[in-house]
Image (cartoon, rainbow, N blue to C red):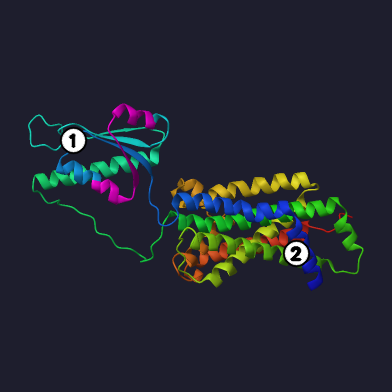
Amino acid sequence: MFKLFLSNLKILTRDRELLFWSLMFPLMFTFIFGFFFGKGSTSTGTIVLVEKAQTPIVENFRKALDESGLFKVQREDDLEKAKDILKKGQAGAVIVVPEKFGEPLPEAPTKIKVIYDPANAQINSAVLSFTNNFLTQVNFQIKNVAPTFSLEEEKTSTNQLGYFDFVLIGLIGMALMNSSIQGIAIGMSKYREDKILKRIVTTPLPSWRFIVSYILARLVINLFQVSLILLIGAYVFGAHLYGNIFLVYLIGLAGAVLFQLIGFAIAGLVKTTAAAEGMATAIAIPMLFLSGVFFPIDTLPKWLYSIVQYLPLAPLLKILRQVALESTSPLENPVNLLIVASWILFCLLFASYKFRLSEE
């Protein structure tokens, strides 16, 4: 079986299209998210600051904007030019500080104007909230009044985590899911169309050895996927990984086996390669966007969350993030482990029932 494993591994590594979709596709996402959110970046986008007053309050406001790390601040003197930058989509908002703002004069303006595009909800919310909080604090200082109510913070973990840390684990799940489901479903269907599976049945080789060797060969590809994503994420873009890497690999490979079983189930249901590709895509795409790859699924509507939390990828990502980012044991929340194990058992039984090397 070892020779068969090496043979399958050589076939897989010589398939350039397979290697591209298995390795380069998830790496492209890693680089894209790394450039935007890597190395601890918390910036929500670029804003244009138009200052028509030079007072201590304005200087403090500018300094607070720069030190917050929330925005990339571009300073302009001409308001029309700033609006043109906003219209071209080169900035998310324009903050206008009027003349004499902050001066101790009765006729001095008391409002800072924020001009924004309603379509850019994320930066709009950040700019409006930041500006309002700053002005509220200034009002308290001028009136010499201490706030009655305040915020007390308590962190459940001392780990420094950002959005890129969150999405990096999601990209690992995405890579394992796409390559395993589509690779197995399309690969086995193509083998069937080319009569390769039928020829294997006529040889003395037990069918289970062929299947196991093929799965093991694909798991090697999965190991390279996880390793490359983690290495680039950690050493190029400064991702934080606090947990046991061995457990991350172990859980990731368990997820790869689950998705491979889904691929075998698809190959058992359809008759052609085109049909396998279509069904694999129809299964993988909803999980890609509804299982927490790019955003937490608990932000979804309750009725939708109650469904998607049981998709195969969703609990797997929760376990991976729990181990890699929170440095806790996967046994602390055994429900997710139970869901993944149930999916593995169900897909194994279904694939064993539906998938055959020969249709005859």
Q: Position of residue 308 (x, y in %)?
A: 54, 51
The residue located at (13%, 46%) in the rendering is 140
- The answer to the question of whether label 1 and label 2 lie on touching residues, with beta carbons closer than 8 A, is no
The residue located at (20%, 44%) in the rendering is 59
Q: Which residue is mark 2?
A: 9
Q: Could you say whether the residue bearing mark 1 is in a helix, strand or loop?
A: loop
Disc on res. 33: none
The residue located at (20%, 46%) in the rendering is 60
Camera sees residue 15: yes
Please give the range of residues in magenta.
63-86
| Mark 2 Cα-neighbour bin, 10 Å: few <14, some 14–19, many ≥20 | many
Q: Position of residue 56 (x, y in %)?
A: 15, 44
| Mark 1 Cα-neighbour bin, 10 Å: few <14, some 14–19, many ≥20 | some
* Magenta stretch contains residue 81: yes
Disc on res. 53: 1
Left or right: where does residue 240 sit relative to residue 270? left
Q: How many marks?
A: 2
Q: Position of residue 39 (x, y in %)?
A: 43, 57
Q: Position of residue 197 (x, y in %)?
A: 85, 58
Closer to the camera in the image, 61 or 114: 61
**Displayed quadrant of residue 210:** bottom right
**Displayed quadrant of residue 253:** bottom right
Q: Residue furthest front?
A: 77
Closer to the camera in the image, 156 or 164: 164
Q: Amino acid at mark 2?
A: Leu
Q: Residue furthest right?
A: 202
* Magenta stretch contains residue 272: no
Which of disc 2 and disc 1 is earlier in sequence? Answer: 2
For the C terminus, the quadrant is bottom right
Camera sees residue 308: no
User: Is residue 65 placed above or below 331 in the rendered structure?
Assistant: above
The residue located at (22%, 44%) in the rendering is 61
